[in-house]
Amino acid sequence: MQDSEWNVATFTVKREGAEAVTITVVGRVHWVLERLIKEGKKSCKPNDNAAPHWTSCVYKLRYAGVHVETVKEPHTKVFAATHARYVLRDSMERVV
């Protein structure tokens, strides 16, 4: 993709049992949405796709009407806790 293509994109969000919605995403939110689409049901973990503001971008996608599920996973490193894995649950189609 060209550098300018990462700045703005329009998508149609399709969810079973709901009317399709068109959204426009910009910058980091676009970058996060592209990662979620690419990974599909496998899901994305911010640790594997390092970038700032993952939670903020997911929040903005949800606010726009995109269904992104947060799956909490435990990890047992030195400081045992949980981390988030994000799964895109809607079908997305890029509008050209």
Image (spheres, grey):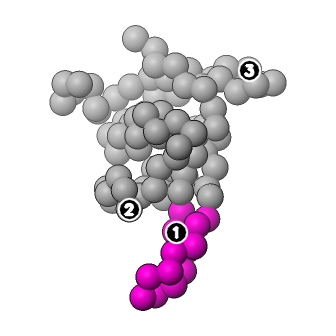
Q: Is residue 89 above or below residue 55?
A: above
Q: Amino acid at mark 2?
A: Asn
| Residue at the spot 37% in from the left edge and 56% down from the top edge | 48
Graded by Cα atoms within 10 Å as few (under 14), some (14 to 19) or many (20 or more), the crowding at tag 2 reads few
- Give 19 or 45, whichever is nearer the viewer: 45
Secondary structure under tag 3 reads: loop
Counting residues from the start of the chain, the first of labels 1 and 3 encountered is 3
Q: Amino acid at mark 1?
A: His
Q: To which residue does mark 1 refer?
A: 83
The circle on residue 19 is 3
Q: Amino acid at mark 3?
A: Glu
Residue 69 drawn at (x, y percent): 63, 49
Q: Residue furthest right?
A: 17
Residue 72 drawn at (x, y percent): 61, 65
Q: Is residue 6 above or below residue 68?
A: above
Left or right of 96 in this view: 89: right
Whether residue 75 appears in magenta in the rendering, the answer is: yes
Q: Residue furthest left?
A: 3
Q: Quadrant of the N terminus?
A: top left
Residue 60 seen in this snapshot? no
Graded by Cα atoms within 10 Å as few (under 14), some (14 to 19) or many (20 or more), the crowding at tag 1 reads some
Q: Quadrant of the C terminus?
A: top left
Whether residue 95 appears in magenta in the rendering, the answer is: no
| Residue at the spot 52% in from the left edge and 19% down from the top edge | 93
Counting residues from the start of the chain, the first of labels 3 and 2 encountered is 3
Magenta residue span: 72-84
Counting residues from the start of the chain, the first of labels 2 and 1 encountered is 2
The residues tagged by marks 2 and 1 sit, at their Cα atoms, a distance apart of: 9 Å
Q: To which residue does mark 2 refer?
A: 47
Circle 2/circle 1 CB separation < 8 Å: yes
The residues tagged by marks 3 and 2 sit, at their Cα atoms, a distance apart of: 34 Å
